[in-house]
Structure formats: structure tokens, C-alpha cells
Amino acid sequence: MKKVMVSLALLSVVFTFAQKKEISAAMKAVDSGDLSTASAKISEAESALGGKTYLLEPKLLEELYYAKGMSLLKSGKPEGAEILSKIGELSSNKIYTGKDGKEKVYFVGKEAADKSGISGLKEETYSPELLNKLKESLNPMIQSSHKSAMDAYNAKKYSEAAPKFAEVYNLLKATGNNDQQYLYYSAITYALAKDNPKAIAAYNELINSGYTGIETKYTAKNKKTNEVENLDKSSWELMKKAGGDYTDFKTEQTKSVEQELYETDLGLLMDSQRYDEAIALADKALKKFPGNSTFSDLKGLAYYKSGKTEEFANSLKEAVAKNPNDKNSWYNLGVIASKDPAKISEAEEYFKKAVAIDPKFVNAWQNLTFLKMGDHQKALDDYNTARKAGKIDEANKIIEARRKRFVDALPYAEKWYEADPTNIDAVSILKSLYNSAGNTAKSAEFKAKEEAMKKAMDASGK
């Protein structure tokens, strides 16, 4: 028997022809409302492709997106809008074509082309052919989804409003109108709905695209109604040139929301304990907004929460080098250093720098107080151990050292109380410190304050 040899090129031709046939059948089925046939044909095409959509020429890929997206939408599945939005991406991205061995390939966008590792790809453009058809089909859906989104948002039903805003964005994108304002609305609303993963995804998309939210508004006063109206740019320019029924032509530029995007996204990442992503985003934000203390603080907090203490300390040192009056960074440096017995003096200096900037910095005074007092329980345990062992001199030295530390801590405790006189912990500590220092009058005064505070707390049910 003769062995039959089939070339790879011939297999590729047969493969492509099969996809064209199935996708064409799916399009006809979805347009006629035969959704079960459309779904079956789409499944056949995708199964043969195995996820390798880059093997389809742009026209065929557009038809696949159309058939699948419309089939899902007509079946009541909102994810169809996201599929259709990929048609808009065909026109907004360059198409990179070439060959992978014997197969012709088509990558949408430079990122996909670079990831392929294929060299010598040619840059082309593609204009989707189904835009007019899509606009006719999708405009009623866009209006309906927009109304549903606004109604749900106004009713504070954020979990319903968010996907509807996303749907409006994707449907508009499918028709060639990449209005990212609706993606921004969906990001905000997903955050309000506490759907952090979807909110983060939307904010990431906005940030990566360079969205700023800056828009130019065009207004003019209608002479007949005497009301100011919003106009599109073309109408505004035409009417301004022609004069007629309008006057007081003005333009106004909205503020950028770019910094807000980074801040909210970072907050969501921190809440979701996605600390490594937060650190990377904070670095990106600081390149865009150098010297921003909020981003520096969040980056440091992400280091701290993820257990990267050394990196946290380094980021704090960078912060105070740029801004010596950053009391929070000095304070946090003190907290880190205080955890290392070898760095107690260093910690004290950091806390002192913080209170020098803000004499009412309660937490810094509190930490200074406890830092000077030392490990109270350990001192008592060591004292009892020495006394039971009959080492009276050693026990006395331990108690004397403890008393001296309490005396040294007293001025800081006084500052703590001065900064926060309603803090019962500060009052209790001062009572003990005055007693240890032999100031019985002051100790009695603060004992009375402590008792009065406790009574007031009991009365209020706290």
C-alpha cells in the first residue's frame, strides 16, 4: 500500500475552511434566533481552535466574537457584552501578522505579539465590518442597560448596578465607542458593593490604559430658553461660528481622577491582603506622583503586613530623607526598632523625632513611656526567681533598676497624659510611676482620677 503524505500547508487550509464554515453557520443561526444551533457551531469552532484564536484572520475572528457575544446576550447572559467588546479591540489595536512555521498567525495588539516570541511580524490595521450591524442591534440594549444601572445605583443596589455599568461599557466598546467613563462607574460601584476582585480588575484596567477622566465640556446659552446647554464639540464649533440662537460659548475641563484611581485600587488591594500587588502598584504610583505621602505610607504598610520588615524600614528611611517632618514615618521606624532589644536607644530617638514634630502625638508618647519602663513582667519574674534562690542582693538590684526605669519613664507618661487626659491607661500608668518614685500625693491624685474614670465607664456601660 502506498503511504499517503499530506502537507502541513494543506492541513492548515482544511482547518481554516472548517472554521469559516462553522462560524458562518453560527452567525446565520444567531441572526435567525436559532440559539441552540449557534451555540453548537461556536463550540465546534472553539474546540478545534483549542484557544488559539490567533490562527484566525481578523475578519473571521470578528465573526466569531459576533456570533458568540450575540448568542450569549440573546440567551440572557451578560458576559456576551464582554465578548462583543473584543470587536472594538480589533480596530483600536494593531494586528501583527506573520508565520509560525507553516501556519499564518494574527496577533491582536503588541503585547500579544511580544508574548508569542515570533520574530518578523508585520504590523497591519483592521477595520471591523460588523460595526453598523452591531450598532443597530446593540443601541436598544445600551439604553436599557444604562437605565437599569442608574436605577440600581440610585436605589443603592450596588451589586446590581456595577455589572450593568460594565455591560454598558462593553456594549459601547463593541460599537467602536471606547467610553471608559462607564468602566470607571463600574469600578466605583463594584467597590461600593464590596466586590473587591471585580473592583480591582476594573481599576487595574483603567490605570493600565492611562485613563485620567479629564474631559472637555462644551456649553452655550440658548437665547430662546435662556438655559445653558451641553453640546458636542462639532455642534459647539459650528454654532459658535454661525452665531444664531446661541451665545456665551464656553469650555470647561474636568479634573483628573488618576490619583484617586491609584489610591482606591491600593486600598482595595490592602483590604484583600494582596500585599505584593499593592507594593508593585505603589511603586508605579510613586513614579507617576513622586513624593506622595499617601502612596509611600501604603507601600510601607504593605511591606509591614506582608512581614517584609527590612523593606518596610528602608521605605520609611527613604520617606524621612525626602521629608524630615514626616512624623508617621519616624514613629513607624521607632515601632520597628523597639522590637529589637539591641535597638532600644535607636527606637527612642525615632519616637523623640516624632514628638518633636507633633508634641500631641499620643501614640509616640505612649510608646516612649513603655520603652523606658522596659519589660515590667520580666523584671518581676527575675526578682521573684532571685529572691526564692536566696540571692537577695541580686533581687534588690533588679528592683532598683526597675524603679530607676520607672522614674526615667515618668516625664514621658506625663506628656502622654497631657496629650490625652481622658485615657485611663495613661492615668493608671502615672499612678504606678508616681508611687514608684515616692510621690505619694501625686499617686493618690491619679488613683482618684482612675477610680472616677472607672465609675464613669461602668455607668455608661463601657
Image: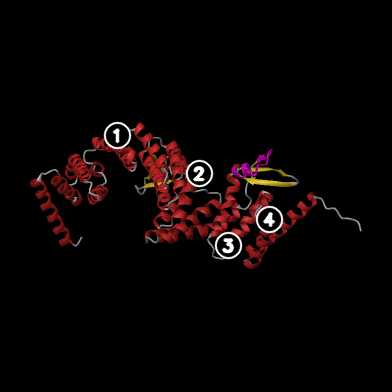
Q: Which residue is mark 1?
A: 325
Q: Position of residue 422 (x, y in %)?
A: 17, 50
Q: Amino acid at mark 1?
A: Asn
Asked if residue 147 lies in the magenta stretch, the reply is: no
> Is residue 386 shown left or right of residue 95?
left
- Tell me the quarter of the image containing the C terminus: bottom left
Residue at 14 percent across and 48 percent down: it is 431
Question: Which dot, 2 or 3, sits closer to the camera?
Answer: 2
Q: Nearer the viewer, residue 411 or 207?
A: 411
In the rendered structure, are the residues bearing label 2 and label 4 in contact, judged by CB atoms less than 8 Å apart? no
Question: Which dot, 1 or 4, sits closer to the camera?
Answer: 1
Residue 47, quarter of the rendered image = bottom right
Q: Which residue is mark 3?
A: 72
> Is residue 365 shown left or right of residue 195?
left
Badge 3, how many Cα within 10 Å: few under 14, some, many 20+? Answer: many
Q: Is residue 293 visible?
A: yes
